[in-house]
Image (cartoon, rainbow, N blue to C red):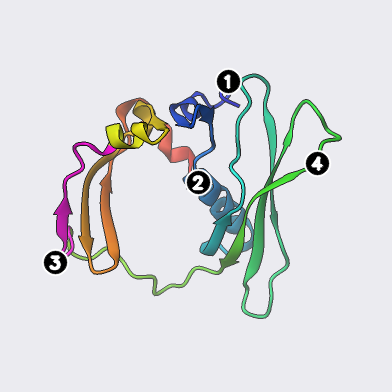
Amino acid sequence: STSTHAWLADHVVSGAVIVPGAALVELAVRAGDEVGASRVRELTVGAPLVLPESGAVRVQVRVGAADETGTRVVAVHSQSEGDPEADWVRHAEGVLEPASADEPGVGEWPPVGASEVDVAGWYPALAERGLSYGPVFRGLRRVWTGGDEVFAEVVLPDEVAGDAAGFG
């Protein structure tokens, strides 16, 4: 709920407070940490996790049994806290796998040959499309493109940077 996680109120889509997709990824990664499969191979968002104006929702992350390679399915569901008989809604599902010791590191920054993109009008343009981001979600500083890849420099605003240690 926004009463326990006030920063979520800064993520508004078409007038509704929506849990960001990155938070769904964080939930999957954290659940994967518990079972030795913290690399997200795939995560598909099927329905937005809308937070009610009052009250809260229960969130459940389910991780399946590992196959012979250690791969597991993961799903994120929610249910209205005020109605324990309500159906659980699936918001995301995907695949977790064990992290590899040879994960690529960050190379030269910004990447060689990447072209910088002007982001000065980014947030006003998003607002015109119904995506209203408050200060907590305005961390995008610079963006580059190269081939079919996008690279971004994102900074947590000072008012929430101290809380970052509590997340993966």
Q: Left or right: 92 with respect to 145?
A: right
Crowding around mark 3 (Cα neighbors within 10 Å: few <14, some 14 to 19, many 20+) is few
Where does residue 84 sit, x and y in percent of width and height?
83, 33
Which amino acid type is marked by label 3?
Val
Identified at 35% across, 32% down, the residue is 128
The reply to whether the C-beta atoms of the residues labelled 4 and 1 are less than 8 Å apart is: no
Is residue 32 or residue 113 the one in the foreground? 113
| Mark 2 or 3, closer to the camera | 2
Which residue extends farthest front? 128
Identified at 62% across, 72% down, the residue is 71
Question: What residue does disc 3 label?
Answer: 112
Residue 4 location, quadrant:
top right
| Mark 4 or 1, closer to the camera | 4
State how far apart marks 3 and 1 are (Cα).
Answer: 44 Å
Where does residue 121 sit, x and y in percent of width and height?
22, 36
Is residue 133 or residue 104 the one in the foreground? 133
Is residue 81 or residue 33 the one in the foreground? 81
| Mark 3 or 4, closer to the camera | 4
Q: Which segment is the magenta one?
A: 110-122
Say if residue 147 shows up in the picture.
yes
Which amino acid type is marked by label 4?
Asp
Which residue extends farthest right? 85
Where does residue 144 sit, x and y in percent of width and height?
20, 55
